[in-house]
Each structure stands twice: as structure tokens, then as C-alpha cells.
């Protein structure tokens, strides 16, 4: 039960959660590297097996983000604000995956981004647009990480502030 009149200090938890999210992305990118190197060393090709690997990787990654979000919610007071933040953490994981941040981390941590002439044929955008290169991927990732993600969190915090103000007004009567 939350005592009324107490303020929650999210400023201490937020950087820790963000660092945990970036750490999870980096670990997943390194696991991705070792799996691919091992797979190609045993004569594998980029066919169905890798598609299935990435499908399971997506499920694993979303499980990690959901676990982080539920752990945050379980450790915080059960209010509407913490519920919105939990949903925001889960959506952040989805946006990072959909925006291609893991692919960027894969190249950034291992060998550097490929030249713009290289087609990223393993991406779903390649199947959709019939071409996908480094420049297109960076613009896609920039849109999701620099436009959609901040707008989503601004919306969540705006709703949270509105809810917090209405609760304070109701309690003061």
C-alpha cells in the first residue's frame, strides 16, 4: 500500500534501467556474433536456420525486456504511473528490436558497419523494399530511436503527471 503524500524517486532507478537495457542489447549482439561465426564455420548458410535463430532471439529479447519491466513494477508501488512505466519499458524493447538497434550493436561491437554498397539481405526491410543498405538502416534506426521512442516516453510521462496531479487534488479534499 502506498502512503499518500510520499513522492517516488524515479531518478535513481531510471539510469539503472537504461544501463541494464543497453547491457542486454550488447550481450545479445555478442551472442549473435558467436552463433553466426560458429554456424558459418560449420558450413551453414543464411537460410531457414538463421531465420529461425533470429525468431527465437526476438522472443528471448522480448522475454528479457518483459522481465525487466515486471521486476520494475513488482519493486515499485502499485500505481497507475508505475504501470505506464512498465508498459513503456516493454514497448522500448520492441522499438529497439524493430528499429534495428541490435544489428547496429552487432556491427559496432565486432567489426564496424559494412560499407553502404553492402545489401543487408537478412533484414525484413530488404524483403519489403527489395534493397536495404547501411545508410537506409541508420535512417530507419534514427527514426525509431530519435523520434518514436522520445515521443512515446514524453506521452507516458505526460499521462503520468496528469494522473499524479489528479490523485493529489483528490487527496487534498
Image (tube, rainbow, N blue to C red):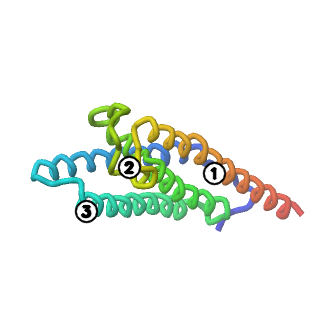
Question: Residue 55, position in %: x, y?
Answer: 34, 62
Q: Quadrant of the N terminus?
A: bottom right
- The residue shown at (58%, 56%) is 88
Dot 2: within a 10 Å radius of its alpha carbon, few (fewer than 14), some, or many (20 or more) residues?
A: some
Residue extending farthest left: 42
The count of marks equals 3
Evaluate if marks 2 and 3 touch, with contact meaning CB atoms under 8 Å apart. no
- The residue shown at (52%, 53%) is 92
Question: Residue 103, position in %: x, y?
Answer: 37, 45
* Callout 3: SS: helix
**Residue that numbered label 3 is attached to:** 48
Dot 1: within a 10 Å radius of its alpha carbon, few (fewer than 14), some, or many (20 or more) residues?
A: some
* Callout 2: SS: helix
Front-lying residue, 167 or 153: 153
**Residue that numbered label 2 is attached to:** 24
Residue extending farthest bottom: 1
- Gap in angstroms between the C-alphas marked 2 and 3: 25 Å
Question: Considering only vertical position in the picture, is 53 above or below 112?
Answer: below
- First in sequence: mark 1 vs mark 2: 2
- Gap in angstroms between the C-alphas marked 3 and 1: 34 Å
**Residue that numbered label 1 is attached to:** 152
Question: Considering only vertical position in the picture, is 22 above or below 164?
Answer: above
Amino acid at each position: 500500500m502506498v502512503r499518500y503524500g510520499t513522492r517516488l524517486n524515479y531518478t535513481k532507478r531510471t539510469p539503472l534501467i537504461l544501463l541494464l537495457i543497453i547491457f542486454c542489447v550488447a550481450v545479445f549482439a555478442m551472442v549473435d556474433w558467436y552463433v553466426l561465426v560458429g554456424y558459418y564455420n560449420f558450413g551453414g548458410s543464411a537460410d531457414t536456420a538463421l531465420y529461425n535463430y533470429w525468431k527465437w532471439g526476438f522472443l528471448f529479447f522480448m522475454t528479457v525486456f518483459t522481465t525487466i519491466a515486471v521486476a520494475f513494477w513488482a519493486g515499485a508501488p502499485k500505481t497507475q504511473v508505475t504501470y505506464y512505466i512498465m508498459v513503456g519499458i516493454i514497448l522500448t524493447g520492441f522499438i529497439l528490436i524493430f528499429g534495428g538497434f541490435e544489428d547496429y550493436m552487432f556491427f559496432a561491437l565486432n567489426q564496424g558497419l559494412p560499407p553502404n554498397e553492402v545489401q543487408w539481405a537478412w533484414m525484413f526491410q530488404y524483403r519489403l523494399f527489395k534493397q536495404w543498405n547501411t545508410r537506409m538502416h541508420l535512417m530507419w534506426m534514427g527514426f525509431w530511436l530519435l523520434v518514436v521512442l522520445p515521443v512515446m516516453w514524453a506521452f507516458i510521462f505526460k499521462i503520468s503527471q496528469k494522473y499524479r496531479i489528479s490523485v493529489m487534488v483528490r487527496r487534498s479534499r
